[in-house]
Image: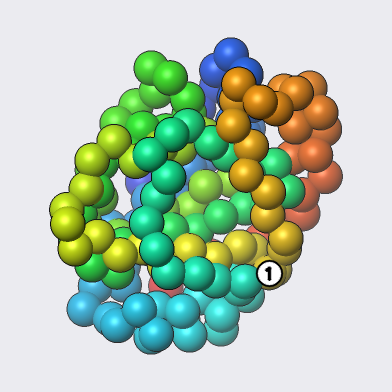
Amino acid sequence: MPAEELLLAPNGRVPNSALPVRVYRAALKDRSPERIGAHLAAREWTNSWQNGIYPYHHYHSTAHEVLVIARGHVTVTLGGEGGPHLALAAGDVLLLPAGTGHRRDSGSDDLLVVGAYAGGRAWDTCRPEQTDPDAARERTARVPLWTHEPAG
């Protein structure tokens, strides 16, 4: 199944990326969080975690991130304040290139997200109001591309 792609322009202090955000609908549906993590690791998306999505705008300038909705549903804003809203449900996979702003707007009580990073890169958490956008853009430009799509 092909991914949906969204291009996000720089938005104030959120750098976003020249690479599109990719959404793979229901790509990992009906899998346990452990199976999702194993699937991602086999595709070189590692340094994984299980939790939710921060309820404030942020981005990662040192790594590409993948978020898999393992359970529940969530609505996120992408790209910073005023960006597009995206509804995601269990099994959906969201690939966020380095620098892409994201925020949880609402979610179900049972929301569980499995996250990981391309090549297991160390990630940072940048908040637009606290991060120098020029320095962040320089860091994102140095992040190597992923070698495998996270879904498939």
Q: Can you tell which quarter of the image residue 146 is in?
A: bottom right
Whether residue 98 is visible to the viewer of this picture, yes or no, is: no
User: Residue 24's x, y, as percent?
Assistant: 35, 57
Along the horizontal axis of the image, is 54 left or right of 148?
left
> Total marks drawn?
1
Q: How is the image coloured?
A: rainbow
Q: Quadrant of the N terminus?
A: bottom left
Give the answer, above or below, for where 136 lies relative to 125.
above
User: Which residue is most to the top?
Assistant: 12
Whole-percent x, y for residue 50 in the image: 43, 69
* Quarter assignment of residue 136: top right
Instruction: Work out whether residue 106 or residue 146 is closer to the camera in this orientation and state it.
Output: 106
> Percent from the top left, x then y, of residue 14?
59, 25
Looking at the picture, does residue 30 appear above or below residue 49?
A: below
Q: Residue at x 70, y 68 (%)?
A: 119
Q: What residue does disc 1 label?
A: 120
Q: Quadrant of the C terminus?
A: bottom left
Q: Amino acid under label 1?
A: Gly
Look at 47% across and 25% down and name the residue there.
Answer: 80
Task: Identify the residue at horizontal 55%, vertical 17% (top origin).
Answer: 11
Q: Mark 1: few, some, or many residues within 10 Å (few <14, many ≥20)?
A: some
Viewer-side residue, 137 vs 129: 129
Q: Residue at x 53, y 36 (%)?
A: 58
* Residue 42 point in image, percent of width and height: 56, 83
Quarter of the rendering containing residue 51: bottom left
Relative to 45, residue 24 above or below: above
Left or right, 146 with respect to 20, comes to right
Can you see residue 116? yes
- Element on which disc 1 rests: loop
